[in-house]
Image (spheres, helix red, strand yellow):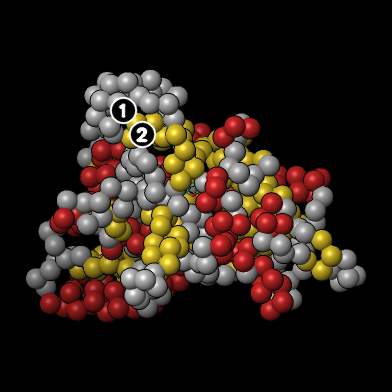
Amino acid sequence: MDLMEKITALAKRRGFIYPGSEIYGGFSGFWDYGPLGVELKKNIKKEWWKSMVYEREDIVGIDSAIIMNPKVWEVSGHVEAFTDPLVECKVCHHRFRVDKEDSVCPDCGGKLTEPKKFNLLTEVYVGTTEEGKEKAYLRGEITQGVFVNFKNVVDSTRIKIPFGIAQIGKAFRNEITTGNFTFRSREFEQMELEYFVKPEAKEAERIFEFWKEARMNWYISLGMSKINLRFREHEDAERAHYAARAEDIEYKAPFGWSEFEGIHNRTDYDLTKHNLKYKDEDGEEYTPWVIETSGGVDRAALFFLLNAYHEEKERVILKLDPRLAPYKVAVFPLLANKEDLVKKARQVFDKLRLSLSSTWDDRGNIGKRYFAQDEIGTPWCVTVDFTTLDDETVTVRDRDSTKQERVAIDKLPQYIENKLHS
Ligand code: GAP
């Protein structure tokens, strides 16, 4: 099995990611996150929000609607220009995105038509009666919700340029071809910052460079290995209609170097289109420029999983940064049939889960429980044994080093918290 197959299988077996609508044969481009996957994604988003909003005075967050007035997408240029070139096989009539290497149909070898433009916006119909139904779109990027609220945010907060608006939420694209597990989906989540600056090219460049480095360093600080990361500047022909400059952060996936975050200089493109201006303290009015950082939560989750996967002798370990691990700690009674051990272990578990995402396991032997926790990335396993009953200490076993330490029960939550933030 190659790494993608291993991750896909592990994700399903252990409850990270399942194929969407699986009992009805699935639905191409849609995925469901299981009990562990939802924790992983929540942790990624939590760390992102912390670094973007809580740790910065100049950035505020919003959560805008997924469906907006369709005029938004006409004015933003997406109805006209949010397109992918598409070719059709003249023999089997399957349709594909144009990739450089495709000169014949990858399914049947037939000849392909000339590329045609295909719009990626997903249409929806809103309204109660057949006649009253109005065509709208599921948002193709979460970004436009920020621009349409630009004035609301400026008027309702004390924020002043330069400042940013952060948002996390679902976006939808009618992708022609989906694939590489969750990498190209039709429904996915984005985490984006729109940072507004004075309309000066030099200032915009300075801020662009700042965010470019900051975003790369954020992934490295959460454990992505540097050798699997690189920047790639977009060529003129591939840039989105709104971008004057675009640089991707790419991960070296088993299917090749792949974008999972884009840094864009959107200039005054969007605010001009929406006819929005900013008035500074001196009464000067201008249209700010926007530097954007746009990351995919699902792609980040996939790459954090690929990056974390290790095989060591008999065991599989997900070496996720503890901040991203679905469970921070697992609690075991040494033996499941000794009532006083189980009772004590339950007390420890109940205490830990007040502040830490924790799990319980009393199946099989300790070795098997370690194996199961390593495979889902739980950084610490706590065992309650006979010594615990005498001296109120437990064994804490570290996922990566397998080293064990004895820790007093009353110091345990703090001990784990310290390790989590060290
Ligand atoms: N607001 C700018 C914007 O949306 P983008 O480069 O089109 O820029 C940003 O998308 C990020 O969203 C990508 O780097 C990727 O992580 C994620 N993304 C885009 N399309 C995706 C898809 N079909 N499936 C999963 N993630 C996707």
Give the vertical position of 1 relative to 164 (above or below). above
Give the residue pinned by disc 1: 89
What residue lies at 52% left-to-right and 46% top-to-bottom?
82
Q: Is mark 1 within 8 Å of ligand 1?
A: no
The Cα–Cα distance between marks 2 and 1, rounded to whole angstroms, is 8 Å
Verify CB contact (< 8 Å) between mark 2 and mark 1: yes
Callout count: 2
Classify residue 39 by image quadrant.
Answer: bottom left
What residue lies at 19% left-to-right and 54% top-to-bottom?
22
Left or right: where does residue 320 sit relative to residue 76? left
Residue 405 placed where, x, y %?
A: 36, 59
Binning the other alpha carbons within 10 Å of mark 1 as few (below 14), some (14 to 19) or many (20 upward) gives: many
Closer to us: 36 or 205: 205
The N terminus lies in which quarter of the figure? top left
Q: Is residue 422 visible?
A: no
Q: Is residue 121 visible?
A: yes
What residue lies at 45% left-to-right and 60% top-to-bottom?
137
Left or right: where does residue 358 sit relative to residue 385? right
